Amino acid sequence: MKKTLLAALAIFVATVPAFSTDYFEKAGDIGQYAIPAAGLGVALVKKDWKGCLQLTYAFAAAMAVTYGLKYTVRETRPDGGDQSFPSGHTSAACCGAAFIDMRYGHAWGLPAYAAASLVGWSRIESNQHYPLDVLAGAAIGILSNVIFTRSKASNVKIAPVAGNGSYGAIMIYKW
């Protein structure tokens, strides 16, 4: 299963730049669903019910924040449309990629992040979003996993920290 997922993501990453802008935009449209679905698929195949729940929470939080901001900020898109900030496509794709990376490790996560990056790039190339919209969407998708997703490996823990006006994350590695 791991090799199949990696091969599918590698094909996606290798072939998308060769497409015209229309196909590239459609690949981004597909990627926003395919990447989180791949994370859910891996969790289901591994019978990782906690992972399924963590992805559900992270995805729901990411979408709530993303669409809450879209209707609050009301930034105009580069093509003249509305609700540009933040990118929902990128938020969804990065949420899936961050889940895969944080739950199952970098061997799974790096190809997922590469595919999510292409989703974000497709949004800029198709004149649907500004780079800041894409970066904000990526941050929302990733941060939702920092809050809800825990590594399946017992020797690595990542947790958010806050205090005295400072915010960040801490990673603990058990030797």
Image (cartoon, grey):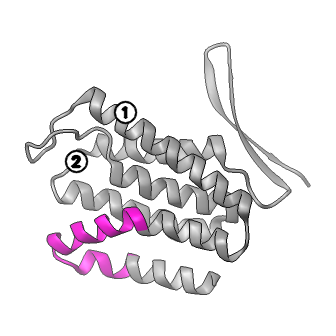
Q: Residue furthest top?
A: 164
From the viewer's perspective, tell me whether residue 149 is left or right of residue 86: right
* Percent coordinates x, y for residue 135 in the rendering: 37, 44
The residue carrying mark 2 is 129
Q: Is residue 112 above or below residue 161?
A: below
Mark 2: which secondary structure?
A: loop
**Can residue 95 be seen from the camera position used here?**
yes
**Residue 40 colored magenta?**
no
The Cα–Cα distance between marks 1 and 2, rounded to whole angstroms, is 17 Å
Residue 139 seen: no
Q: Residues within 10 Å of mark 1 (few under 14, many from 20)?
A: few
| Tag 1: amino acid | Gly
- Percent position (x, y) of residue 1? 63, 84
Residue 34, image quadrant: bottom left
The stretch in magenta equals 13-33
Nearest to viewer (mark 1 / mark 2): 1
Who's the residue at 53% across and 47% down the image?
A: 142
Q: Secondary structure at mark 1?
A: helix
What residue did someone put label 1 on? Answer: 68
